[in-house]
Amino acid sequence: MNTKLALLLLLGYTFAPISQAQIKHIEMRVEGMT
Amino acid sequence: MKQHLGRQSGVQNVEVSLIDGKVEVIPKEDGQIDPAQLLKATYDSGVTAAEMNMTAAGKIVKDSSGNLALQVEPNRSFVMVPNEESKQLEALVGSSTTVTIHGQLYRKPAGKREKAVVSSLKLTILGVEKKE
């Protein structure tokens, strides 16, 4: 029973969508740059 | 400025366009990048930041004051400026949905030259790119 549960959890992690929360891109507009 | 920003933690690459004054920062995937720190580093390098936009994925949460926020790391979230877009995200508070948002974190007040108040960056949503 425990083995089946562990296997299910493992499969769940394996196929979970990769949607990491994170900052993906930053863009700035600056003034006074030479 | 490129070297100065490139030395900040969490920064993988910095692209600077001298023609239109655009600075593009590509973060590392370690989640260590701090927009407030980048803004400070920009000023420290001797230029004025006119605006800062960000694309980030995270969960919609409410902070201790009840403000809607985008949580991008367990210890980092950005309070959202209330607008039509943010209202539509309110239903996702507490859900496991990850939302990718394009928004503005900073815009220099018109006619002012003083240093940005970097401690209170608020995210104005410009668009919701993805919900998953």
Image: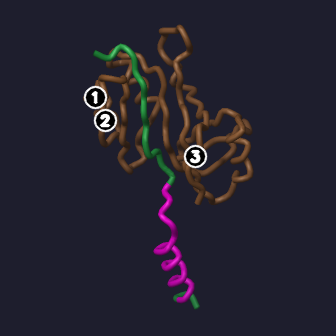
What amino acid type is highlighted by mark number 2? Val
Residue placed farthest to the front in the image? B19
- Chain designation of label 1: B
Residue A23 in sight in this render:
yes
Image chain in brown: B
Gap in Å between the C-alphas at discs 1 and 3?
28 Å
- Chain designation of label 3: B
Q: Give a yes or no on whether discs 1 and 3 share a subunit.
A: yes
Secondary structure of the residue carrying tag 3 is strand
Residue B64 in sight in this render:
no
Residue placed farthest to the bottom in the image? A1
Quickly name the residue at label 1. Answer: B2
Secondary structure of the residue carrying tag 1 is helix
Residue placed farthest to the left in the image? B3
Q: Is residue B66 magenta?
A: no
Q: Which residues are magenta?
A: A4-20
Quickly name the residue at label 2. Answer: B14
Q: Position of residue B122 (x, y in %)?
A: 59, 31
Looking at the rendered image, the quarter that the N terminus of chain B falls into is: top left
Q: Is residue A7 magenta?
A: yes
